[in-house]
Amino acid sequence: MPIRYVKQADIDPVKWDRTIDVSLNASLYGKSWFLDSVADTWDALIENDYMAVMPLVFRKGFVFTEIYPPLLTKYLGVFSSLPVDHDKINRFILHIPEKFKKINICMNRLNTQSLQLDRVSGQTCFELDLISSYDLKRKKYSPIVPDNIAIARENKLSLIKHLSLTELEYFLRVNVKSGHRIRIFSSLRQILSRLNKKGKAIVVGVYGPENTICSVAIFVNDTNSIILLYACTNQQCSAYKANYLIIDSFLRDYSGNNITIGFDYTDTIWNENLYHDFGAVKGYCYNVIINRLPALIKWAF
């Protein structure tokens, strides 16, 4: 089937989102409105009449135009209602227009299983099955988890399960650098405004001993799963182990359901060790990385 390059203005959002919804690898990240929220500009590769699609999030620089992983988006790649083999993945990648001189796309896990390219870079992802009860989950915790939860309680941390956008904005204003904060909150405000209407977002906050917010985590209901979309903890609450308190509370509320949680957000505090302590299983996604710049300047970028 033919694959064509389509500019953002010419993409049919209804057909696009229908394709994402019925895809074997359906994901919030691929929805048109989510892409609009996290990226200023994105085009796409579309096979036939939206049989399979691949978003291309890009930005123009002074020297070149590049495809890059957008904010708050763990993976993208090819979405299809039918299995995709490595030949189809490669055909999509080869159809990326030459005007994009640098390419960095994190492929979703179904793509990863079919990916056979030399130019890839791996990144970890963590999932935890919530089918078993909380009591069974707790027995599989690392020994450090109850100790850290005890530290949180000793420091009188209090957890709020439905933080408002106003409270979230205040926290980000105090704890995140200005340029990054503006981009983060602008995207989160659009995403949460949509998801809150459908009851599909949970914004958790932790108040510290001084009765100020010192940690936030945003969980989102995705197709057959819940994802940790974003989290941030300041240094004080990091020492007080607020992140352990948040995850334990979440598992207490949602264990015993036939869903999986994807710990998609990572930073220096919300990291591999934290998720491993709660029994999450490590997997891998892969970034396709291509540099088409001329040899004389390729080394500089």
Image (cartoon, rainbow, N blue to C red):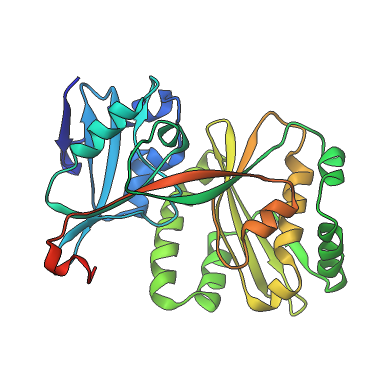
Closest to the observer, 105 or 293: 293
- Report the side of 27 relative to 234 (left or right): left
Q: Position of residue 273 (x, y in %)?
A: 68, 59
Q: Quadrant of residue 79?
A: top left
- Report the side of 202 relative to 159 (left or right): left
Q: Position of residue 72 (x, y in %)?
A: 45, 54
**From this viewpoint, is residue 12 visible?**
no
Up-down relation of residue 212 to residue 23 (above or below): below
- Report the side of 23 relative to 171 (left or right): left
- Report the side of 299 relative to 83 (left or right): left
Residue under the point 55% across and 59% down: 266
**From this viewpoint, is residue 267 visible?**
yes
Quadrant housing the N terminus: top left
Closest to the observer, 141 or 206: 141
Q: Position of residue 156 (x, y in %)?
A: 83, 71
Residue under the point 63% across and 57% down: 272
Quadrant housing the C terminus: bottom left
Up-down relation of residue 83 to residue 282 (above or below): above
How many marks the image carries: the answer is 0
Residue under the point 48% across and 51% down: 123
Closest to the observer, 104 or 171: 104
Residue under the point 81% across and 53% down: 142
Closest to the observer, 251 or 66: 66
Up-down relation of residue 22 to residue 40 (above or below): above
Q: Position of residue 57 (x, y in %)?
A: 28, 50
